[in-house]
Image: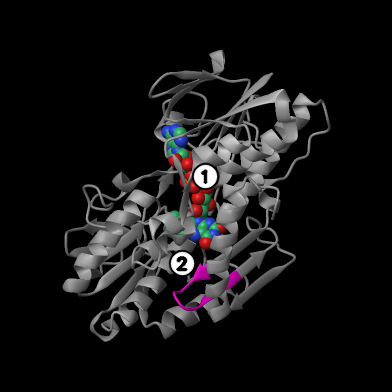
Amino acid sequence: MHKVVVAGGSFAGLTAAFDLKRRLGSDVEVTVISKSDQFVFIPSLIWLVPGWRTESQISFPLAPSFQKKGIRFVHDAIARIEPERNLVHTTNGAEPYDYLVVCTGPYLNFAAVPGTGPEGGYTQSVCNLPHAQIARRRWQEYLRDPGDIVVGATQGASCLGAAYEMALNQAYALVRAGIRDKVQVHFVTPEPYVAHFGLGGIEGGEAAVTRLLEKNQIQVHLNVAVDGITPDKIRLSNGEEIGYRYAALIPPFMGIEAVRNSPGIGDAKGFIPVNDYYQHSQIDNIYAAGIAVALASPDPTPVPTGAPKTAYMSEIMARTAAHNIAARIHKEKLSPVPIVDIQALCLLDAGNTGVFFMVDRLQRKTRRRTIVMPGPMMHVGKFMFEKYFMWKSRGGRTYLP
Ligand SMILES: Cc1cc2nc3c(=O)[nH]c(=O)nc-3n(C[C@H](O)[C@H](O)[C@H](O)COP(=O)(O)OP(=O)(O)OC[C@H]3O[C@@H](n4cnc5c(N)ncnc54)[C@H](O)[C@@H]3O)c2cc1C
């Protein structure tokens, strides 16, 4: 029996594990090792902060879902990969593998901009559940003694759509708290223009997102790096200094420590170089999917931005990796899906409205089809999508769109 180890239990890890088991059945033992024993629907963490969602509404325990499908689950963190011996070392031992799929997401590199981050810095983050819980606590304290807020992303950050969502949702939370007129909301971003998103923008996206920012009277600071930060002031690279009482900034991402500790696995930032089968470019029984994968920005900017790796892209990468591992085991034809050809479906939420984006080839500048649709239904759409995605993932129905 072939042993496949999947590291990570989120968008990419769940898809890889369920798809492998479905395709290979009793020919394979699938083991998922994840640092968290929960699946968390990360796109809804923006709603956890103002208290519009609870943990139980946007997460579920992984073990029962895997158990039902005959997948072994190990709640542990991988510490190092030893490809010469086909071993993954964890905090508590080691797992042998015939194939390894690395889906471990990002390391949040707050150290790149000293003073940022909720642990040892002054800014909040919604990139994972523990950070969003701290951000919620700080938001409740802030509401008792409000003042101006700064939201956005630091130089080198990817996932810039989430920064817009944070700013728009926090502006809307201030409206609901009845204090919007007392607070100036600042949005800081390394992007050269609104909705560049680290990829050169999407036709119609800049106008749609600018309208939302203007309607919400959010003051935008474009093309800036964060030069320094103190408990009450942010200094930007254009010389501006902004006072704040609450700040939330997306940091740059790196690959996780375990990859950076394993020579030959990751690039300089700890991301994994892959080919069109999501197979490691040098090691043929290691695959990767999701944020763990190395991806160059298709449109480098004067102040650096990172290329986005969305949840949908993460699922497609994982599905392709699983399909090709199964095809190798069954000696069938392999099917490549170049990363530049993956489409993107995204809902940028603004609290009571939003913008839907559909792009056929997110990472290319020449696209054949782009849809940008703003309106209140997009907020409802994101809520419905959360419910659908939780149902689909909890039941292992990763074959559904
Ligand atoms: C606030 C926010 C909003 C977003 N909104 C959207 C959106 O609207 N639409 C969209 O498409 N995308 C959105 N994204 C992006 C989306 O969340 C990511 O694309 C997605 O989470 C990537 O999935 P992943 O499985 O690669 O990594 P992750 O979701 O980061 O998961 C990583 C997994 O690896 C595990 N792990 C980490 N380290 C270890 C270790 N050492 N050992 C074992 N396991 C480990 C973790 O526990 C976790 O299970 C948003 C992101 C953020 C932060």
Amino acid type at mark 1: Ser
Residue 240 seen in the current view: yes
Write down the residue under mark 2: 192
Residue visible at 64% across and 44% down?
317
**Residue 265 sits inside the magenta stretch:** no
- Residue 351, image x, y percentages: 44, 74
Is 75 situated left or right of 355 in this image?
A: left
Image x and y of residue 381, in percent? 58, 71
Mark 1 CB lies closer than 8 A to ligand 1: yes
Tell me the distance, in whole angstroms, between the alpha carbons under discs 2 and 1.
31 Å
Task: Say above or below: 93 vs 300.
Answer: above
**Quadrant housing the N terminus:** top right
The residue nearer to you, when weighing 393 against 131, is 393
Please tell me how crowded label 1 is: few (under 14), some (14-19), or many (20+) other residues with Cα within 10 Å: many
Query: Residue 198 in the image: x percent, y percent?
Result: 51, 59
Q: Residues in magenta?
A: 348-356
Q: Is 293 on the left or on the right of 174, as rendered?
A: right
At horizontal 62% and vertical 74% (from top left) the residue drawn is 372
Mark linked to residue 10: 1
